[in-house]
Every structure is written in structure tokens, then in C-alpha cells.
Amino acid sequence: MNGMQSISKQTNIIYHPIGIVHSPHKERGKAPIQPIYADGFRGYLEIFPEFVEGLEGLEIFSHIFVLFHFHQARSFKLKLTPFFHDTERGIFTTRAPERPNPIGLSLLRLEKVTDNKIYVNDLDILDGTPVLDIKPFTKGLDMRTESRDGWIGRIDPEEAKKRGRRESKNDK
């Protein structure tokens, strides 16, 4: 057994939320599936008082990465059929919430920071979701000019936009 297997089976890692999401998305299965499909969905992150000092200077960034706990995720699956596809895939090739460690990541547009509230747009996270961490997005550190989108690159962009926002034909 190598060192990583030994650590993963013996160590519990405990995180404590730094805040909570306030979102228009109340029901699992109705929220947009990614921030790119959530334009116009606004809300805010309420940061707990003991962490507010850490927000200093955040307002000068245009976007933030939010790491959160998928608090409504079901038990994990190592293989599943992704939202946009009809072929079963390994969980680590998807962004599905049913993960061994139910940690989510969203890149949100930052609108303003007021006291302990971070107002955001492109919000795809459920109301009441625990926030684990916040990190600024920066073009210089986070953009990659050469990348591969794997199976996701084969999805029709217009169909993805419609399905990603969870729009039905009746919504138009």
C-alpha cells in the first residue's frame, strides 16, 4: 500500500463553513447546472462574522471561485451518466454533485461586497448551501489558452445553454 492509500483510509478531514449561500434556487434539479448558464441569477454569500476581516480587498476582483459543500448530494457514484450526455462516464470527468467528497466549485461574477455580504451574479448554487472557501479569479493565473474539453466539447452549445439553464419549451 502506498502512502496516499494509507492516508486516505486513516485520516478524517474536517472543514467548517465560513458562510452560507442565499440564492433564488430553492430546489435541487431546478437550478442551472453551471454558472455559465446562470446569467441573471443573483444572490449573495453571507460570511460569518469571524471571517469578515478576510474579505478586505475582495471588491476589486471581477469574479470569485466559491468552494462549497453539496449539502443535498446523494451518496456518491464512481460512474454516472452526465446531464448533457447519454454515455456513462467516470465521476472525475464530470461536475456532478454525487462525489466521494461532495465539494462544489463555481466561478461567480462579483457585483459588490457590503459588510459580511458578497453579492454575486451567475449563481448556480442552492439556497442554504454551506460556503467552504472563496478565492479570487485572475486572468493571469487562471486562464489557459490551450486546453481540452474532453467529451464536453462535443455538446452542441445552443442545446447546452437551453438545457443548462433548465429551460423547457414552455418557458419561452
Image: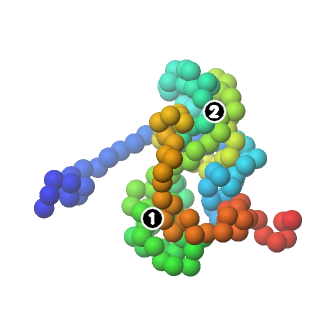
Label 1 packing within 10 angstroms: few (<14), some (14-19), many (20+): some
Residue 118, percent from left and from top: 64, 32
Towards the viewer: 148 or 129: 148
* Label 2 CA crowd tier, 10 Å (few <14, some 14–19, many 20+): some
Is 10 situated left or right of 80 in this image?
left
Position of residue 62 relative to residue 122, above or below, is: above
Return the residue at label 2: 62
Instruction: Please report the residue visible at 68 percent of the width from the left and 29 percent of the height from the top.
Output: 112
Q: Which residue is drawn at 29% across and 49% down?
A: 12
* Secondary structure of the residue carrying numbered label 1: helix
Q: Quadrant of the N terminus?
A: bottom left
Along the horizontal axis of the image, is 171 left or right of 104? Answer: right
- 141 relative position to 33: left or right: left
Judge whether residue 98 can be spotted in this image. no
**At 60% across and 29% down in the image, what residue appears?**
61
Q: How far apart are marks 2 and 1 (CA)?
A: 28 Å
- Placement of 159 over or under 55, stated as above or below: below
User: As shown in the figure, which amino acid type bears the numbered disc 1?
Assistant: Thr
For badge 2, the amino acid type reads Ser
Badge 2 marks a residue whose secondary structure is loop
Quadrant showing the C terminus: bottom right
Question: What residue did someone put label 1 on?
Answer: 93
The numbered mark, 2 or 1, whose residue comes first in the sequence reads 2
Q: Position of residue 160 (x, y in %)?
A: 67, 65
